Image (spheres, rainbow, N blue to C red):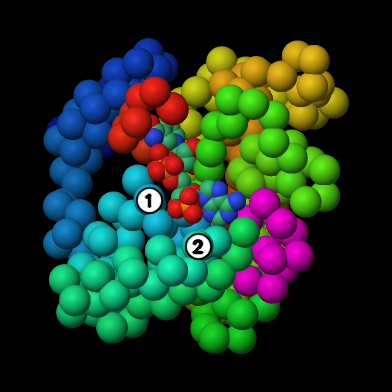
Amino acid sequence: MNSRVVEALDSIIEGLVVPSFTSIGPALRRRLFQWQALNSYDLSGQVIVLTGGTSGIGEEGARLFAACGATLVIVARNAAKTAALLDELRETSGNQKLDAVEADLGDQQQVREAARQLADRYKRIDVLIHNAGALYNTRKRAANGTDLAVELMVASPFLLTGLLLSSLRKAAPARVLTMSSGGMYTQALTVDDLQMSDEDYQGAKQYAKAKRAQVVLNELWAQRMAPSDIVFHSLHPGWHCRDFQNC
Ligand SMILES: NC(=O)c1ccc[n+]([C@@H]2O[C@H](COP(=O)([O-])OP(=O)(O)OC[C@H]3O[C@@H](n4cnc5c(N)ncnc54)[C@H](OP(=O)(O)O)[C@@H]3O)[C@@H](O)[C@H]2O)c1
């Protein structure tokens, strides 16, 4: 199919939002863009840093990256859970290049320490994936008092990207992926109101605001960095929930 037709069809799917952000989107795009099977990629030699790799979508990603031979580093707050997952992945994939850095991404001191360890251990980072995220039904605050959703999904990824720019540039062209959400379409970006007041707090709304801010920040990074150095992507993963009561 002609590439302009493919792009036009892709824009239509995107513009209609629902077909783009449900399972229809990847199914159509797989055919339009002739995507190859994910597990057919050879990622050996690629250093991939992944946050939120201990559960859900990130864990599935970790399984895939391990199976494809990547050097995978999971940045996670629960050391025992991460170690158990990495042991399992070493056994099932045979890939021994799996590593962990411990950090609670709701704490900027720990984000800084994680960045220092990553830069010390790896000469270059090919891919940085900001996947950790959460929707808090009641207001939670980070160590510095910031709304925890904003800290975890906006401030912390921004800080980690900034601190790892030099490691990413060494892998030019590197990639930074941010796992946002189609839920962001429900909220415009209002910088003054990025953190809702305690009185008005609604978890889904606060989550959507943070996700919108992630995407806008991603665009700003992309404007400032040469794509020959670092390419920035933000994406929606599809809808998935293990426990609908607590979604
Ligand atoms: N599921 C969906 O339908 C959906 C839809 C749109 C977007 N998303 C986005 O996709 C991403 C993954 O979602 P998911 O459903 O796979 O979530 P999940 O199963 O709840 O996993 C969230 C991951 O983030 C980590 N995390 C949370 N708070 C953290 C913190 N303070 N410090 C370090 N790590 C922390 C968790 O670590 P622990 O294992 O220690 O808890 C876990 O690994 C999120 O950004 C989410 O917003 C999901």
Residue 180 visible at all: yes
The magenta stretch spans residue 111: yes
Foreground residue among 121 and 198: 198
Vertical side of 203 occupied by 178: above or below: below
As drawn, the label of residue 46 is none
Q: Ligand 1: does it lie within 8 Å of the C-beta at label 2? A: yes
How far is disc 1 from disc 2 in space, using C-alphas?
11 Å
Left or right: 112 as drawn, with respect to 212:
right
Q: Quadrant of residue 137?
A: top right
Q: Which residue is mark 1?
A: 55
Left or right: 49 as drawn, with respect to 61:
right
Q: Which residue is mark 2?
A: 78
Vertical side of 134 occupied by 190: above or below: above
Total marks drawn? 2
The magenta stretch spans residue 66: no
Q: Which residue is found at the position 62% from the left and 59% from the top?
A: 104
